[in-house]
Image: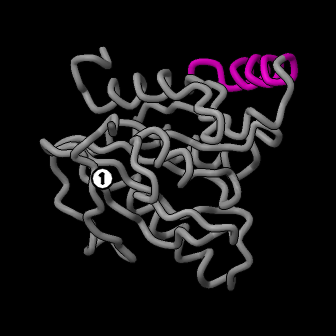
């Protein structure tokens, strides 16, 4: 059974005027194009295939909105930093994200998805900056944790937590092994203002 049974795709937006109405509460997911963002969204929401996954990094080139019911949404932001795309497309992604973070009043939280083997890249730091400017709480999802030994994973998590301090919470996660799934759902629920997330 899905953790969020009402989850459904709403629309994709290529510019601010195409965003869904700015009401309720919305949690965004952002990350490098090869960090496993779509797989993480599908695992957390318990809906296989809801967010598009691809072996070709960078397939998410639009802001994708998903309804969770009752005025609650998740957004899948464009992947960044790895996809082989024209510079004009990268520039448009930056403008789209800038519009999103500066004008989205319903934004209640941000998950930054990053490969646990390569955390806190320059692009991830930029995303943290966007969230900070928007006054948005952040949770770091260190994905592909199954690729690390238990000791290496723990050391990476500790190092990331030390580096970001109070700017974000962080956890290890694996969509393949369902590592950290309950923790991630608790954070999502808290951002969405759901009772069981408090």
Q: Does the magenta stretch include residue 161?
A: yes
Could you tell whether 165 is left or right of 188 in the image?
A: right
Q: Mark 1: give few (<14), some (14-19) or many (20+) Cα within 10 Å.
A: some
Q: Name the residue under label 1.
A: 104
Q: Does the magenta stretch include residue 58?
A: no
Q: Nearer the viewer, residue 114 or 108?
A: 114
| Residue appearing at x 50%, y 39% in the figure | 111
Write the start and end of the magenta stretch as one range: 151-167
| Residue appearing at x 73%, y 43% in the figure | 115
Residue 159, by quadrant, is top right
Q: In this view, does 136 lie above or below 154?
A: below
Instruction: Kindly give the residue lying farthest to the front in the view shown.
Output: 1
Query: Quadrant location of the C terminus?
Result: top left
User: Which SS class for mark 1?
Assistant: loop
Could you tell whether 178 is left or right of 125 in the image?
A: left
Q: Nearer the viewer, residue 66 or 23?
A: 66
| Residue appearing at x 67%, y 43% in the figure | 114
| Residue appearing at x 47%, y 48% in the figure | 42
Query: Quadrant location of the N terminus?
Result: top left
Tell me where residue 112 appears, x and y as whole percent: 57, 42
Residue 109, by quadrant, is top left
Residue 65, by quadrant, is bottom left
């Amino acid at each position: 059974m899905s953790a969020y049974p009402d989850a459904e795709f709403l629309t994709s937006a290529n510019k601010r005027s195409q965003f869904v109405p700015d009401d309720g509460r919305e949690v965004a997911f952002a990350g490098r194009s090869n960090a496993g963002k779509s797989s993480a969204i599908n695992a957390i929401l318990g809906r296989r295939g809801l967010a598009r996954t691809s072996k070709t990094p960078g397939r998410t080139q639009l802001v994708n909105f998903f309804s969770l019911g009752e005025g609650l949404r998740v957004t899948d932001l464009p992947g960044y930093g790895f996809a082989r795309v024209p510079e004009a497309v990268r520039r448009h992604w930056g403008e789209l994200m800038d519009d999103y973070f500066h004008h989205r009043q319903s934004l209640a939280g941000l998950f930054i998805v990053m490969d646990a083997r390569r955390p806190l890249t320059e692009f991830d730091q930029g995303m943290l900056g966007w969230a900070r400017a928007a006054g948005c709480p952040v949770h770091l999802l260190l994905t592909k944790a199954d690729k690390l030994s238990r000791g290496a994973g723990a050391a990476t998590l500790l190092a990331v937590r030390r580096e970001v301090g109070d700017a974000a919470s962080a956890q290890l996660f694996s969509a393949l092994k369902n590592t950290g799934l309950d923790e991630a759902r608790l954070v999502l629920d808290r951002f969405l203002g759901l009772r069981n997330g408090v």
